[in-house]
Image (cartoon, helix red, strand yellow):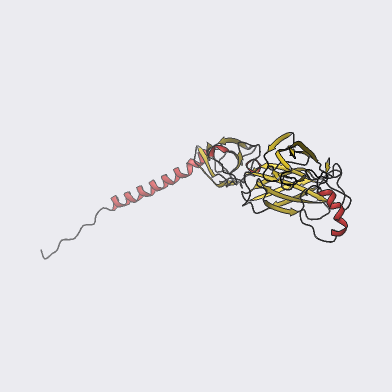
């Protein structure tokens, strides 16, 4: 038997609430089961299956949910079963099994993502950036009504709200973005759902379960420093701050350097676990630019590059022989000056003192 989600309820109420501001929505509780024996209802916003509590008449042994090709069994608590957050936009099947007045009985309900195909958001992606905020983006569905407005809701694994926001209205709705700034309640897993509303009719929702460690995009490395001598250059940096705990083995880095010489091409080296790198000094002793970026060994994503760190100047120093000639000339000049002073002292000699005539 079909179960009516939020979209149908919103359509019935749209004429009364059109002028009033609307809060970000989530899939709403289903309508009650018309069978008075169990009177089963399913609330997709809390993943809770509920049935009638008639003492002595109904006893539920177990309940089950099948969604995303996975079946999960639960033992009842009182007159309900609550499941862990799970993606529901593909629909779900709910089951209750027990006895009614001692006779075996069961109920099966189907939860359907109501609305026209293609009306819901698509390509939902979320990232934790700078170790402090969650940013989610999606695209408007290919068959979405022109007046569609989407809303985002983020819940943690226990079903508590982390963020709610609505995409601002505008002419460009090809890509929409919402940002959550307070992640104090966010844990290792999060449930993200994008719902839509339109005066034209129901809009399908799109939801996803995300692992926060896997969606974190690192910031660029910090405290990048560089020094060079006649043979080698050394670069050092600090790992960026992270939202999820990471060990040195979880990091990888990429270092890029390029000299200012004609025809110079950037060179890159990837390293893991280390936060320093030494490489031979470029043949050209002019300007050298270095930058570093960070990545997680468990994903293909990289951070942005750190600001380019430059050492030296645009103008190359004089060629090698001339560079050695300058200090050599300075030494020779000092030697000539010292020799002239010595000759002057020897030539003049010490002055004699006349004898005292009284002696």
Q: Is residue 90 at least partly visible in the picture?
A: no
Residue 301 image offset from top left, x and y in percent: 66, 39
**Image point 28% across, 50% down: which residue?**
346
- Residue toward you, 268 or 78: 78
- Residue toward you, 98 or 336: 98
- Residue toward you, 81 or 357: 81
Q: Residue furthest bottom?
A: 358
Give the image quarter of residue 141.
top right
357 with respect to 40 (left or right): left
131 with respect to 79 (left or right): left
Quadrant in the picture for the N terminus? top right
Residue 99 image offset from top left, x and y in percent: 74, 38
Q: Is residue 69 at least partly visible in the picture?
A: yes
Vertical placement of residue 287 versus 22, above or below: above
- Residue toward you, 278 or 135: 135
Q: Residue furthest left?
A: 359
Quadrant in the picture for the C terminus? bottom left
Residue 59 image offset from top left, x and y in percent: 71, 41
Residue 258 image offset from top left, x and y in percent: 61, 40
Numbered disc total: 0
């Amino acid at each position: 038997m079909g179960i009516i989600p939020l979209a149908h309820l919103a359509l019935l109420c749209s004429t009364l609430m059109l002028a009033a501001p609307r809060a970000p929505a989530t899939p709403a509780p289903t309508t009650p089961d018309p069978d008075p024996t169990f009177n089963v209802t399913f609330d997709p916003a809390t993943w809770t299956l509920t049935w009638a509590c008639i003492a002595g008449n109904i006893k539920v042994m177990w309940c089950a949910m099948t969604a995303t090709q996975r079946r999960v069994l639960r033992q009842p608590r009182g007159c309900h079963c609550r499941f862990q957050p799970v993606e529901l936009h593909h629909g779900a099947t709910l089951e209750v099994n027990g006895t009614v007045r001692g006779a075996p009985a069961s109920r099966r309900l189907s939860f359907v993502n109501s609305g026209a195909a293609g009306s819901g958001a698509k390509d939902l992606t979320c990232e934790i950036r700078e170790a402090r905020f969650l940013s989610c983006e999606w695209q408007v569905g290919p068959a979405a009504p022109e007046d569609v407005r989407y809303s985002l809701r983020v819940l943690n694994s226990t079903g508590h709200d982390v963020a709610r926001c609505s995409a601002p209205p505008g002419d460009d709705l090809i890509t929409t973005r919402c940002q959550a700034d307070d992640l104090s309640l966010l844990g290792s897993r999060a449930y993200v759902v994008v719902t839509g509303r339109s005066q034209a009719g129901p809009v399908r929702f799109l939801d996803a379960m995300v692992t926060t460690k896997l969606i974190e995009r690192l910031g660029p490395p910090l405290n990048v420093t560089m020094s060079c001598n006649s043979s080698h250059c050394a670069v050092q940096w600090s790992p960026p701050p992270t939202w999820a705990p990471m060990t040195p083995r979880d990091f990888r880095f990429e270092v890029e350097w390029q000299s200012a010489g004609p025809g110079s091409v950037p060179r890159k080296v990837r390293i893991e676990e280390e936060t320093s790198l030494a490489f031979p000094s470029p043949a050209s002793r002019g300007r050298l630019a270095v930058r570093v970026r960070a990545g997680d060994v468990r994903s293909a994503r990289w951070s942005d590059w750190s600001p380019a760190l430059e050492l030296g100047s645009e103008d190359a120093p004089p060629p090698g022989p001339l560079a050695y000639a300058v200090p050599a000339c300075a030494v020779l000049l000092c030697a000539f000056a010292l020799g002239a002073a010595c000759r002057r002292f020897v030539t003049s000699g010490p002055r004699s003192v006349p004898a005292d005539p009284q002696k």
